[in-house]
Image (cartoon, rainbow, N blue to C red):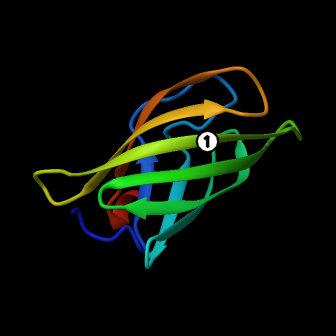
Amino acid sequence: MARSLDGLVLAPVADQAPGQVGTRTRFTYHEREGEIWAEYTGGDVVRGHLVGTREGDRLDFRYVQLKRDGTTSCGHCVSAVVELPDGRVRLEETWEWESQPGSGTSVVEQVTAHEH
């Protein structure tokens, strides 16, 4: 199993659709005894939260976010935790909105301290 996500900061490797998370979004993860949660902000997202569980290298969580235009949205995501050759962590995500149509995949990777 890949190492704990607790305290790690991750960022998308590519921009999603306009108005969604993008390369300027930062996710700060926390993990304890099978629970995971994170706060995220940046780009079009003013404030976002996710909460869920980890079993082995699989995350299952729901997310909710407030965008700059004042709208809110929420959805469900399942992620695979992958340890990269340089020791950083990557999450390979499959997500679907629950508050609006749409689904897709994305990748977030751990950023180092000077990239925050």
- Depth check, front residue: 64 or 15: 64
**Circle 1 SS class:** strand
Quadrant of the image containing the N terminus:
bottom left
Tell me which corner region of the image, top left, top right, bottom left or bottom right, holds residue 56.
bottom left
In the picture, measured across the screen, residue 86 lies left or right of residue 65, that is: left
Tell me which corner region of the image, top left, top right, bottom left or bottom right, holds residue 67.
top right
x, y (%) of residue 48? Answer: 69, 53
Quadrant of the image containing the C terminus:
bottom left
Residue at the extreme front of the image, as rendered: 55
Q: Which residue sits at x=42%, y=55%? A: 10
Q: Which residue sits at x=41%, y=74%? A: 6
Classify mark 1: residues with Cα within 10 Å, few (<14), some (14-19) or many (20+). some
Q: Which residue does the numbered mark 1 point to in the structure image? A: 76
Q: Which residue sits at x=37%, y=61%? A: 55
Residue at the extreme bottom of the image, as rendered: 33
Identify the amino acid type marked 1: His
Q: How many numbered callouts?
A: 1
In the picture, measured across the screen, residue 49 lies left or right of residue 30, that is: right
- Depth check, front residue: 93 or 108: 93
- In this rendering, the answer to whether 44 lies above or below 50 is above
x, y (%) of residue 86? Answer: 13, 55
x, y (%) of residue 38? Answer: 57, 63
In the picture, measured across the screen, residue 21 lies left or right of residue 89, that is: right
Residue at the extreme left of the image, as rendered: 85
- In this rendering, the answer to whether 46 lies above or below 2 is above
Q: Which residue sits at x=74%, y=47%? A: 65
- Depth check, front residue: 80 or 25: 80
In the picture, measured across the screen, residue 100 lies left or right of residue 9, that is: right
x, y (%) of residue 115? Answer: 38, 57
Residue at the extreme right of the image, as rendered: 70
Tell me which corner region of the image, top left, top right, bottom left or bottom right, holds residue 113.
bottom left
